[in-house]
Amino acid sequence: MTEIASVPRLLQAIRAALDLTQAELAERLDVSFATVNRWEGGANRPQRAQLAKIEAVAEEAAVKYGDAPLTGDAVVPRRRGRQAKSAAPTTKPMEQMLWDAACSIRGEKDAPKFKDYLLPLLFLKRLSDVFDDEIGRLAEEYGDREVAIEIADNDHSLLRFYLPPESRWAVISGRAPYDWPDDERGRTTRPRDIGEHLTKAVRGVVRFNPTLAGVIDIVDFAAERNAERDINPAKLSGVVETFSDPRYRLGLADVQPDFLGRAYEYLLRKFAEGSGQSAGEFFTPTEVGFLMARILRPKPGQTCHDYACGSAGLLIKLQLVANEFDPTARVPLKLYGQELQAESYAVARMNAIIHDMDVDLRRGDTMINPKFRTPSGSLDQFDLVVANPMWNQPFSASLLEDDPYDRFNKNGGTTSGKGDWAWLQHTLSVLKDGGRAAVVLDTGAVTRGSGSKNEDKERNIRKWFVDQDLIEGVILLPDNLFYNTTAAGVIVVLNKRKPEFKKGMITFVNGKKRFTKGKPKNHLADDDVADLARLFNSGESAEGEVAIIDLQRVADVDYNLSPSKWAHQAEAAAHAELPELLAQLDELTIEDTNLTAELLRVLGPLAETGTER
């Protein structure tokens, strides 16, 4: 007989092997969707007869166990004729849903505006699916779904978010009836079309959940301009119908963590591709965020900050990894984020709400007006800082020189070029003593100015950080991970109090080869994320991937912090593509020309002296 503790993993494996949603599996087992959802989440246990049905379906799916109960070891689903899928939810169905929805209103709005309409709808669908999950939980407790809804209607505290009837997706999509009441003057409140219905729906959600004001109700779906609707109701109906597809459920167990941030990221990328423009905003790939979190290893109760938080994905991943490291912890991380862009700020609030996480989010330009300050006006400081600020961003020299918080002059001086190290100087200013940070930057930030005869301010700031022994390490990421660039990027890890075995040393990790090929973008597999974090934190060298270099050697090469310089992967050159080899040849030719010119300049006076003699 199956161990009860293994049931959630077994159900996931069955669904992966047979490619079923929770609703479809529920139908196979002759139980409600909510029952399967509760079983898979570990909240309820199946009875003996139900367990027998589960085992029968498992046998049909050819899902096999190891000898031990599956509380720690993975269930391995096996399928004849093709490789088994992972049981974890993927973003692919969601991406297809979003693109289908976008295509259904294409032409109605400029491409960049699509997300303003789709994301609130996506959020509403998520809230509605979670509402249904929680009604299902109550139905199991009270024995009847209608009774559960009646109880929830009278006690909203039983739910995370209460949705009035007109805001529930089944009513919006026309799959459930609803008798619209008359107003105080006896007139019907029934909306004329889906646009009016959606606007009433989001306003209804806000009426019962005031914390969602300014998050879900950011657009009017019935807005008109010159007596014409901004979006044709027929097109909106198409979007609603697309979101209603049962394959695209967004309940508690149906989507990946940070799915809303991923949705925002996906929409920006697709619309940028379609218009031939840059997305204009920069998002951190999910796996890079998890790598940063695993490197920092957050502990319960720590304060964590992202000063360019976008959709708050990096902060959310810190909490998810903290939960993974210590699942019994009762004290959550304390999360703080600042974001400049209004759209990203709204998505960050949605993301925090969806994850039931308390994130203190504030809007504003961090470099000009950092919002997290003490009563005395100095900057708040945090245990952990994560960020992916805009790469190579220029800043006015006057802004850096006259900074009221003294973030720059005291931390290595001011730069007159690109602002990558200015962001690291800000990072240092908001780190507590003993704090750590992981910041994503362009690869050029760790090499610019090294070896130059001219005095370079960026190189000088880098020198100051090295001399102060603040850089714990640098990780080189693979090419083509980020959505609006093919550049690799690096993670710079700062540490104000290095452990003894890392003092006076910098850890360089070359993760160039750690990628899985994809279209249009590569990605880091889970195993690679875990391996890279382990390699970085171990403090041990690994041939071709990890080099532990003392500060004097770094100084000897004029503070070049490129991991590829220290952790060589020589075999890569032997397999390089022809264009890459030609580019390298061009660089060597230019370098040779410059060296020859420099040599002639130095030897010129000697030649003239010899001629005079």
Image (cartoon, helix red, strand yellow):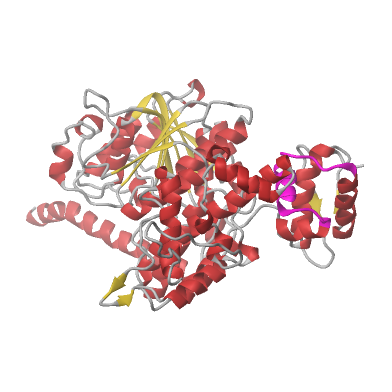
Please state the total of marks drawn on the protein image.
0
Q: In this rendering, would 428 be left or right of 52?
A: left
* Residue 218 in view in this figure: yes
Please report the residue visible at 32 percent of the width from the left and 39 percent of the height from the top.
424
Where in the figure is residue 583, as x and y percent of width and height?
A: 40, 66
Q: Does residue 512 sit above or below 535 in this rendering?
A: below
- 510 inside magenta stretch: no
Instruction: Name the residue at the right extreme.
Output: 1
Please report the residue visible at 54 percent of the width from the left and 31 percent of the height from the top.
539
Instruction: Name the residue at the left extreme.
Output: 612
Quarter-of-image position of residue 175: bottom right
Where in the figure is residue 346, as x and y percent of width and height?
A: 38, 51
Where in the figure is residue 545, as x and y percent of width and height?
A: 55, 45
Quarter-of-image position of residue 600: bottom left
- 40 inside magenta stretch: yes
* Residue 527 in view in this figure: no
Location of the N terminus by quadrant is top right
Q: In this rendering, would 350 be left or right of 538?
A: left
Q: In this rendering, would 41 be left or right of 280?
A: right
Q: Does residue 497 sit above or below 595 in this rendering?
A: above
Where in the figure is residue 139, as x and y percent of width and height?
A: 70, 45
Instruction: Name the residue at the front extreme.
Output: 186
**Front one among 320 and 416:** 320
Please report the residue visible at 22 percent of the width from the left and 59 percent of the height from the top.
597
The range drawn in magenta is 29-48
Q: In this rendering, would 489 be left or right of 252?
A: left
